[in-house]
Amino acid sequence: MHIYVRQVRHEDWSELQQIFLLTRRQNYLWLDSDNFQLIDLDDQTRGETIFVAEDGRQEIVGFISVQEEGGFIHHLFVKSDRQRSGVGKALLRNLPGWLERKYTLKCIKLNHNAAAFYRTCGFTEAGFGTAKDGEYILFERGKA
């Protein structure tokens, strides 16, 4: 499957909200999903750069949000039925300076599939902490 990555457009927003809401409800089973809302994406990505992944039919299948100044990947979400098909890797590879710069992210420890994915993408554990959603692993990749 060919994946095309581009910057977000205004008309993408409702689809991204749906992906964010549904994917969290399907995968974040340790959290109370009754508190998840469509507006959560707006609140959590304010000021971030967002890229979307489209398949060959121009269907949005995932997105990534980044705080570019610090190289912090805040969110990477792929539709549940498109996971393990290269979408997440395509989103990462298309980040500005992917090969030249350092990127970091936090992954909730209970999200075992995501942690395994980041390890296969070359991320290594750089620390641990606790956030409102639970204990997390701080991952980093690339040059300091």
Image: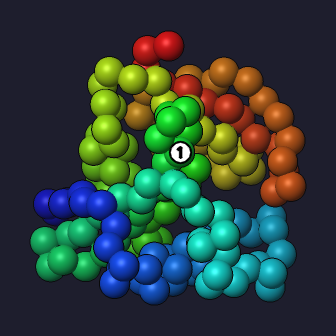
Kindly indicate the quadrant of the structure image that contains residue 125: top right
Visible residue check, residue 116: no
Where residue 2 appears, as percent x and y from the top left, is: 14, 60
Q: Residue at x 30, y 61 (%)?
A: 7
Image mark count: 1
Where residue 40 appears, as percent x and y from the top left, is: 67, 75
Secondary structure under the numbered disc 1 in the rendered image: strand
Horizontal arrangement in the rendering, residue 26 relative to residue 96 (left or right)? right
> Please, which residue is most extreme toward the top here?
144
Where residue 9 appears, as percent x and y from the top left, is: 32, 73
Q: Residue at x 55, y 39 (%)?
A: 72
Kindly indicate the quadrant of the structure image that contains residue 143: top left
Nearer to the camera, 23 or 143: 143
Q: Residue at x 80, y 64 (%)?
A: 30
- In this rendering, the answer to whether 48 lies above or below 38 is above
Q: Residue at x 59, y 63 (%)?
A: 46
Horizontal arrangement in the rendering, residue 24 relative to residue 52 (left or right)? right
Q: Which residue was labeled with disc 1?
A: 67
- In this rendering, the answer to whether 51 lies above or below 82 is above
